[in-house]
Image (cartoon, grey):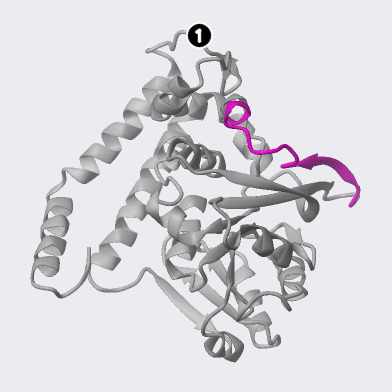
Amino acid sequence: MESINSAKRTIMGTRLEMAKLCAFMGKEPWVISSNAAFDNCSDPSVTVIITLYNYSEYIQECLDSVCASISDRLPGGFDVLVIDDCSTDNSASLVESYLQRVDTPLRLVKKLYNTGLADARNCGLNLARAPFVFMLDADNWIYPNCLEVLYEAINESSHAAVYGIINCFDNKTGEGVWLNSFYEWDVSELLITPYIDAMAMFKKDILLKIGGYSTELMLVAWSGLEDYDLWLNLAQSGYTAKLIPRILSSYRVHNSSMMNTTNVYFDILAQYLRQKFTKLIEQHKDVTTIFRMPRDMEINTESSAILQLREAKSMIEAMETSKFWKLRTRWFQIKKLVGITEQ
């Protein structure tokens, strides 16, 4: 099984490089289609970024919930970006049909390469037109007041993000099973366990400043804690977030939901995070449990997690020292020097 996952990670790394190669050659690694409402919405306050991969069963309910959003107190309104990560079902075609039927500003971005959730979200960040972005996966949905409530809380605040309480419901029965993201922002608690979901509103410029979502997590383990890594990155960079104590969205719990998949790889990723966020850990010496493990637990340098991490780092280093990468970097330096484009 591990050899299969290793092969998948290698393929994912190759796809990420192919997407970068497209950009290097002057061709964006996606195809875009928009409705007239999107073209006429020039200055939205909020961009909703929906990441989509093989969720044809759920995408319409997700879109319906966003389109039903109240926007009276959103200057310029809101727009929606659906980032399709090379779905192999009819998810993308459903969105293409949907955007022609609604007057909500909607754009579909069909990526040419399947590069994972983090890269899909980063694609949305780079294409978003609004100063604030709300992250949403295609199998979840929001309540009509979600965007307005979060926007009013974050606009002109000092926080990098705001988040509301999430109702987690069973996909088969539709019944609520638990609540998520209901604790106040606390870095000490964040170091212990991921307790805030990705469904939140962010200041786009700050996310771009810290590098967005970490695509390298897919090279460490087949499924990553992209949202957890982002919250930790914000904290280590000195930013804060704020809880809005209202239920504003719903999370669908089913076999293929990210919550279930991530738990399988948590131990591997936790060892990676211990090394990545050493500075943040040192700032909170009173925390005795780090990423669900005892703080003083020695890391086994021969464990599968560390060996996997070494493999991932070797893959990244090999990519960045390749002749192509050096040529690409030099080309961008020349273009910047002569004023053709900005780095």
Residue 149 shows in the view: yes
Tell me the kind of residue under disc 1: Met
In the depicted view, which residue is nearer to us: 106 or 281?
281
Indicate yes or no whether the magenta region holds residue 177: yes
Residue 103 falls left or right of residue 144: left
Label 1: how many Cα within 10 Å (few below 14, some 14–19, many 20+): few
Viewed as shown, does residue 241 lie left or right of 22? Answer: right
Q: Is residue 88 above or below residue 31?
A: above
Left or right? Give the position of 133 relative to 57.
left
User: Is residue 51 visible in this depiction of the protein?
Assistant: no
Residue at point 50%, 37% (across, down): 232
Q: For this rendering, which residue is in front, 243 or 221?
A: 243
Position of residue 277 in the picture relative to residue 265 (left or right): left
Secondary structure at numbered mark 1: loop
**Residue 338 vertical position relative to residue 52 in the rendered view, above or below:** below
- Residue where numbered disc 1 is placed: 297
Q: Residue at x 18, y 52 (%)?
A: 325
**Quadrant holding the C terminus:** bottom left
Q: Position of residue 314 (x, y in %)?
A: 27, 33
Q: Which residues are magenta?
A: 174-190
Q: Nearer the viewer, residue 111 or 282?
A: 282
For image coordinates 51% across by 67% down, the residue present is 131
Residue 50: percent from the left, percent from the top? 60, 63
- Residue 150 found in image quarter: bottom right
Q: Position of residue 46 (x, y in %)?
A: 59, 70
Residue 165 shown in magenta: no
Q: Measuring 46% from the left and 23% from the top, which residue is drawn there? A: 283
Please, is residue 177 above or below residue 146 in the view? Answer: above
The mark tally for this picture is 1
Q: Where does residue 59 sit, x and y in percent of width and height? A: 70, 66
